[in-house]
Amino acid sequence: MATPTGGTFDIQALPDLPPGSKWEDNAVQMWVNLVNRTVRKIFMAHAVITPAAFSTQTSDQTFTVNGLIASMHVWITPPDLAAGVFIGYANCPADNTLKIRFVNLTGGAVTPTSGTYHTTGIAH
């Protein structure tokens, strides 16, 4: 069976569970309530990204990742981090747009690692 490389998945409402007397039942109910009330979509993709070199302390770079929705909460996992470079944050400022802030700790020119960035977005 082929594994999809990315997409948007609808979260369907789960039925409310009857409250239980055990802690586990209450914890499950809490998660069901959280999903039912806050999460609209979960997006996952393996985006091939080629960041540009920069010599400033930070560099905000944008990339097209089809399926992202503006204002999604975004988490990324890069293929690796170049020496002296780390990711300050990632967000989704517009539909299909991933913005990553790269931080340069070297004081010289750096090029963040190119490759497949695992991207997860959650829309509330």
Image: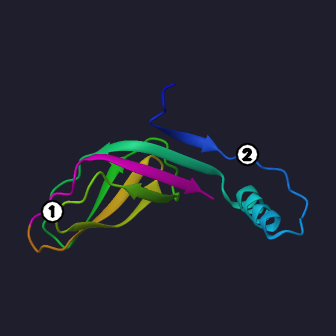
Q: Which residues are magenta?
A: 109-124
Left or right position of 32 against 118: right
Neighbourhood count class around disc 1 (C-alpha, 10 Å): few under 14, some 14–19, many 20 upward: some
Q: Which residue is mark 2?
A: 12
Q: Which residue occupies 66% across, 56% down?
A: 39
Depicted 46 relative to depicted 34: above or below: above
Q: Position of residue 122 (x, y in %)?
A: 56, 55
Identify the residue at the far left of this view. 108
Left or right position of 98 against 73: left
Depicted 72 relative to depicted 96: above or below: below
**Label annotation for residue 75:** none
Front-lying residue, 117 or 25: 25
The amino acid at mark 2 is: Gln
Residue at disc 2, secondary structure: loop
Q: Looking at the image, tell me whether mark 1 or mark 2 is earlier in sequence order.
A: 2
Q: Are marks 1 and 2 in contact (CB under 8 Å)?
A: no
Residue at disc 1, secondary structure: loop
Q: Which residue occupies 48% across, 52% down?
A: 120
Identify the residue at the far top of this view. 1
Q: Position of residue 32 (x, y in %)?
A: 76, 58
Residue 46: image quadrant is top left
Q: Which residue occupies 16% across, 64% down?
A: 83
Q: Position of residue 69 (x, y in %)?
A: 52, 50
The amino acid at mark 1 is: Phe
**Label annotation for residue 54:** 1
